[in-house]
Amino acid sequence: MAIYCLDAGAATTRVCLAGEDAPRVRVPSARGDNEQTPQTPSSPSRGLAPDWAAAEEVWLAALAAAAPTVDAQAVVITKPLLAPERTTRRLRKFALKIAPRVWVCEAPTLALLGAGLETGVAVDVGATAARAVPVVDGRAVPHAARAAARLGGDALDARVGQVLTAKGLRFSSKKSFFAAARKVKETAAAVQSERRPQLSLLTVELEDGQSVSLTTEDRLRIGEQLFDGGGIDAVGLHELVLAAAVAAADGAKRAKLLNGVFVCGGGSLVDGLPERLGDELRKLAADPDAVQIRAGPRRQDAAVVGAAALAAAPDVEVAWATADAKNISPAVAAAAAAASPARSVVEATPRARAALAHASASRDAAPESSPRSFTPPPPPRESPMLSPASLDIVRQGVSKIAAATVSPPRHALPPLPPPRTSPVQVPDGSEGAPFDLGVESPQAHDPLRTEKPALPPRERDVDEAARRAFEQSAAEAADAAIVAGLRREGQLREQVEALEKRRSPVLFYLLFAAACWFVYVRDREGVRWTH
């Protein structure tokens, strides 16, 4: 019995067992027999609905090749930070076919925790994009994550293709081209660095027998795209990391994030990238001494190795999902396990608490017992960082506000002030009792100048809740109108396309008839001219 760890990347699928420091199997995330047109199924790391039939075949083949004679005790699968909920459910459903327990966890956090860091920024230069994900106390900060597609491995492959084409190289198939681009990217691509001497001419032998000589300019042209963004006004890798750190925290916590920048992913194998990233960050950071870059020799396997390290740690027991409890959120499963006498969740260590907090913070469906409030859908998910007493207080407050919600009047004007009065002027200059002049001030009919009288505290709360509910309903109505307009626009576009398809044969026959008539008239006139 063993615990399998699967990293389903967009370009490469990696598999290893718990406790191992390197993957046993590393295969391309592609499926197909035609060498010229390999079909690459869309990966969950892209955040879209993939071709699950093809992807599961690749994953099953990789798992079978890793340990064909070992039964699966559990499966750990990596996923991107902002993967949709349907992707998590499909990954869990696939893993439960192989093992009775499964844990689906974000790849950047696994890579950072596997490197021994609880707080830092995971810089993942993957195939489809480069991502900077801040992690605070073992928990990723989704709203602060930053990504750029122009800094991914696919963009580097396109730049390598431009260099190889300029050198006069030709490839017989896409497979040979991608193999050549990957080898050139991993062996010859480089970035400028003050700590390294001048680059020299490099000759690369390709798998198809061709060879290419790359000058210093060619090597830098490939790697420098990671820092110039590949275009005007594009964001470089260092700006991506700094933006993520600034959005995640401030003060001492931000300095701690920059002190734990961990570089991973296959695109990070560019020569000199960690050193150059550190130099660029020190130029932008408020405290240059706080910036520290960490990168391992096999950083392309950081996510799966981190999953294997956490799965085999003796002081960490994650909240595994089973077939009976696959629809229960990790927060509820962790709370139930922590309340049991066996205490099967974690031990009291900082690293274990960080791993549990991260597992509990994955965006699964909220439990059915959570209260529904008047906030827009989807309902807010319960945070595992709150105690049960705090959650009860929050539920009571939401219930009171929802109960006090009323619909405000659409054309309510502020109330008029009382009639204006003036004291009686007596001959000796003294003032008598006030009386009504019978003429009201012009301000009484000016709602812009009349101040609304102060409301009691409870009525003020009700009025504020009503205002918020009114704004919320207006926003929902606007969103619904936008969605309806977009749907109507799509329907009209489909109708126009269908009409054009029906009209095309008719136009063809009309043009053909006109051409035939033209030929007939020309021939008839020609015969007449001849005679």
Image: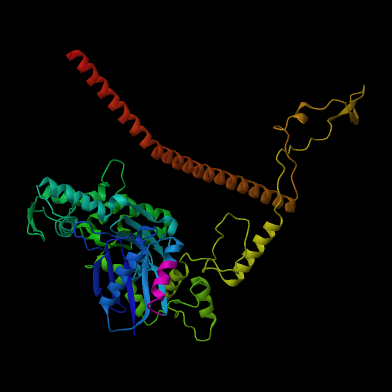
Left or right: residue 224 versus residue 369 is left
The answer to if 224 sits in the magenta stretch is: no
Q: Main secondary structure of the magenta part?
A: helix
Q: Is residue 250 visible?
A: no
Q: Nearer the viewer, residue 79 or 518?
A: 518
Residue at 67%, 49% (x, y): give it.
464
The reply to whether the magenta stretch includes residue 94 is yes
Give the number of marks: 0
In the rendered view, does 22 fall on the left or right side of 255? left
Residue 8: percent from left, percent from top: 32, 66
Q: Position of residue 459 (x, y in %)?
A: 74, 51
> Picture coordinates of residue 320 (x, y %)?
44, 77
Horizontal side of 247 relative to 394 (left or right) equals left
Q: Is residue 136 visible?
A: yes
Look at the image and give the residue range highlighted in magenta.
89-99
Quadrant location, the N terminus: bottom left
Quadrant in which residue 346 is drawn: bottom left
Position of residue 355 relative to residue 122, above or below, is below
